[in-house]
Amino acid sequence: MIAERSTYLLDLLKIEKLDAILFFGLPNMRYLSGFTGTDGVLLIGAVETQFFTDSRYQEQAQNQVSTDRITCYKNKFKTIVEELQACGYRRVGFEAAAINVAQYEELTNISRDSFEWVSLTAQLQLLRAVKSADELSALKQAASLNQQAFDIVMPLIKPGVTELKIALELEYVLKQLGGEINAFDFIVASGSRGALPHGIASDKRIQEGELVTIDFGTRIDGYYSDETVTLAVGEVDRNLRQIFDIVLEAHDSALAAVCSGKSICGLDAVARDFITANGYGQYFGHGLGHGVGLEVHEFPSVSAYSDKDLMTGMVITIEPGIYIPELGGVRIEDTVVVTGDGYQSITTIPKQFKQLST
Ligand code: ZN
Ligand code: ZN
C-alpha cells in the first residue's frame, strides 16, 4: 500500500462501519498499490491489505505491489469470497463503478448471505481528486510531449492533407518521444466536420479557408495529457473568426475564474453565460471540462450539474466549444491545476488565433 494514500480509506472504513473495501478498477488499484497490470483486485481491510491477481501477473505483482499478501486466483470471485470468509469479514464495501451487473450477480451468488455488500461510489470520488507533486510532474511531462509533438506536426497541416494523416503523425511522434499510449482516438475535425464535437480523424482532406480542431493527448507514468487546439488554414470567413474569438474569450474568462473554493457549476456558467450572451448558447452542448489523472476523464465533472467546489490540487480541463451544423466548429482546451488563488496551466501550446500559411 502507498501509505499516505491509505489514510483516506482507513477513515472511510470507520465512517461506513466497514470491515474491508474491494477495489476492482485499475486506476484506483494502481493509485493505491502501484500495480500497472490489467487484471487484479485490491482488498483493503482494517488490519490487512491483500492483492489478488492471475498467474500472468504474479511476478509483476510481487515486484510492484506492497500489500501484506498477494494471492493468485484461477476463479477470481470464488477466491476472493473464500479469503473474505477466512478473514471473518462481514460488512464489505466495493467499488461499484468498476464492476458490472453480471459480475456483481456472480459475486453475490457465490457469497450467498455471507456478507453485507455496501456499494461505494460517491464515497470514493475524492480519493484521487487532489494530485501530489509526483502526479503533477507526470501530468506536466505528458503535456510537454503534446507541445513537442504539435510543434513537429503543425507544419504538415496544409490544404490537401487528410485529417487521418495529421492524427497518425501526432501518434507516431508522441510515441517516439516516449508517450505510452494515445489518451483517446485523436480528433482532427476540419471544415464542416468541426461541427462534430467528437469528430475522430477521417480521410477528409483539409482545405484552404477551413478551421481545424485537433484534440489529442498521450500518457506518461499512467497520467494523461488532454488538450485541444483550433487553427485556421489560410484565411477563414468572418463568421468562423467571430466564433473562434468568442470561444477563446469564454476559455480565458473561465480560466481566470478558477480558484480553490469556486463552485464548479459557477465555473461552467462563466463560459456558458458568455457564449449564450453572444447568441451561441444552443451550440455549446457539453460540459466545460473534466478531471484528468490516471484516467483521461475522471472526477470532477466540470458541468452545470456539479454540486462540488474546486479544491487546491485538483486537475481539470477547461474546454468550451461552439459547433454549428454544416458550418463548422471551434473548441479550445487546456488542462490546469487549481491553486489557492487561481490556477497553473499544465498544457502549454498557445491558444490564441493562429492562421497557417498555405
Ligand atoms: Zn480533449
Ligand atoms: Zn478533455
Image: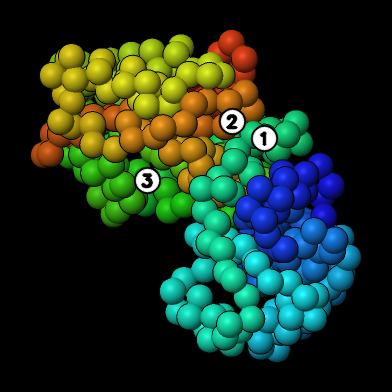
Residue at the disc numbered 3: 187
Which of pointers 2 and 1 lies earlier in the amino acid sequence? 1
Residue at the disc numbered 1: 131
**Where is residue 12 drawn, in percent x and y?**
67, 49
**Where is residue 39 drawn, in percent x and y?**
66, 72
| Disc 2 residue: CB within 8 Å of ligand 2 | no
Asked if residue 8 can be seen in this view, the reply is yes
Quadrant in the rendering for residue 28: bottom right
Q: Secondary structure at mark 3?
A: strand
Q: Are marks 2 and 3 in contact (CB under 8 Å)?
A: no
Could you say which is closer to the camera, residue 8 or residue 149? 8
Which of pointers 2 and 3 lies earlier in the amino acid sequence? 3
Could you say which is closer to the camera, residue 183 or residue 46? 46
Amino acid type assigned to the residue bearing label 3 in the image = Ile
Question: Closer to us: mark 1 or mark 3?
Answer: 1
Q: Secondary structure at mark 2?
A: loop
Residue at the disc numbered 2: 314
Amino acid type assigned to the residue bearing label 2 in the image = Met
Residue drawn at 77 percent across, 44 percent down: 7
Amino acid type assigned to the residue bearing label 1 in the image = Lys
Q: Are marks 2 and 1 in contact (CB under 8 Å)?
A: yes
**How many other residues sit within 10 Å of disc 3, few (<14), some (14-19) or many (≥20)?**
many
Question: Closer to us: mark 2 or mark 3?
Answer: 2
| Disc 3 residue: CB within 8 Å of ligand 1 | yes
Residue drawn at 65 percent across, 67 percent down: 91
Q: Which mark is residue 154?
A: none
Left or right? Give the position of 37 relative to 255.
Answer: right
Could you say which is closer to the camera, residue 86 or residue 64? 86
**How many other residues sit within 10 Å of disc 1, few (<14), some (14-19) or many (≥20)?**
some
